[in-house]
Amino acid sequence: MKKLCFLSFLLFAASNTFAQDSTSTQQPETFDMEWGGENITMQKYFIVFLKSGPSRSQSEEEAASLQQQHLAYLGGLYEQGIINLNGPTGGEGDLRGFSVYNVATMEQAVEYANNDPMVKAGRLVVEIHPWWLAKGSGVK
């Protein structure tokens, strides 16, 4: 019985140690460096490429509704500080847009990206890469 209790405790502890979720207080990775005579902090962000998905045969009304849900979802993530940059690309290619996620782990980025209504519907798919950038950088 003691062995069973101990094993249960170990499994519980391990699952809590390795579990990652979007409510985690874990901070993104950073490091300091000198560049151009200035000390800067580099941070790992995650760039999420939104690409045309396999399911694009929705009616015009369904596609318009999904687009509204998509924009509301991404806007909410922006308001929460989860997305720093976001927008569509031009043209008719496979790449439809991208976002820069300010989260601590790839798992969090995947979770947020996969909860996008357009991704859930299969109209878009995501490709996610870590991206190092000076912390607090913006487009000038």
Image (cartoon, rainbow, N blue to C red):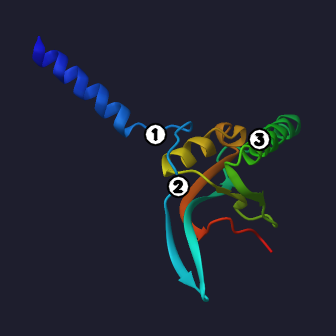
Foreground of the two, 122 or 30: 30
Counting residues from the start of the chain, the first of labels 2 and 3 encountered is 2
Say which quadrant the N terminus sits in. top left
- Which numbered dot is residue 76? 3
Please, which residue is most extreme toward the bottom here? 36
Rendered image quadrant of residue 136: bottom right
Identified by mark 3, the residue type is Gly
Residue occupying image coordinates x 88% and y 35% = 61
* Residue type, numbered disc 2: Pro
The residue carrying mark 2 is: 28
* C-alpha separation, residue under disc 3 versus residue under disc 1: 21 Å
Side of 28 relative to 138 (left or right)? left
Marks counted in the figure total: 3
Depicted 124 relative to depicted 131: above or below: above
| Image quarter of residue 60 | top right
x then y, percent, for residue 6: 17, 21
Give the residue type at disc 1: Gln
Structural distance between the alpha carbons of marks 2 and 3:
20 Å
